[in-house]
Amino acid sequence: MDVWTIVSVVVAAIAALFGVQWGIVKGKISQVASLVRETLELINALLKALEDDKVSSEEVALLKSEANDVKVAFKVLLGKKVEVE
């Protein structure tokens, strides 16, 4: 084998390793985006509930649901098992 064959094999191996790592990083970026999206939905629901200085039972239920969504997204980001309700 000549030098260029060895160099191309090494470059191909490095590219494969970076491809696998990119897949892992891309998955984590997606999980972080999901967590941020769920957190913003919770904040928006909270602000909407507090607009009239009263919180109704429907708004409390919505806030609980949104908080649970944030908790689930955070657990997914940490790699923990998530119970489906």
Image: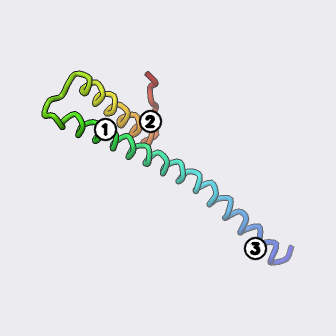
Asked whether 29 or 50 is in front, the reply is 50
Q: How many marks?
A: 3
Q: Is residue 46 found left or right of 19 in the rendered image?
A: left
In this rendered view, identify the residue nearer to me: 17 or 43. Answer: 43
Image quadrant of residue 39?
top left
What residue would you read off at disc 2? 80
Of the numbered discs in the image, which one, if any, rests on residue 7? 3
Q: Is residue 64 left or right of residue 36?
A: left
Q: Name the residue under label 1.
A: 42
- Mark 2 vs mark 3, foreground winner is 2
Q: Which of marks 3 and 1 is nearer the N terminus?
A: 3
- Which of the pair 48/65 is nearer the observer? 48
Estimate how packed mark 1 is, as few (under 14), some (14 to 19) or many (20 or more) residues with alpha carbons within 10 Å.
Answer: many
Q: Residue at x 20, y 24 (%)?
A: 56
Q: What element carries label 2?
A: loop
Q: Where is residue 77 in the image (x, y as percent from the top left)?
A: 44, 43
Q: Of callouts 2 and 1, which one flags the residue occurring earlier in the amino acid sequence?
A: 1
Secondary structure found at label 3 = helix
* Residue type at numbered disc 2: Lys
Residue drawn at point x = 80 percent, y = 76 percent? 4
Amino acid under label 1? Leu
Identify which residue is drawn at 38% across, 33% down: 69
Q: What element carries label 1?
A: helix
Give the foreground label among 2 and 1. 1
For the residue pair 71 and 55, the one nearer the viewer reads as: 55
User: Marks 2 and 3, Cα distance to the nearest angstrom?
Assistant: 41 Å
Q: Nearer the viewer, mark 3 or mark 1?
A: 1
Q: Residue furthest front?
A: 52
Q: What residue type is labelled 3?
A: Val
Residue lying farthest bottom?
A: 3
Left or right position of 22 against 70: right
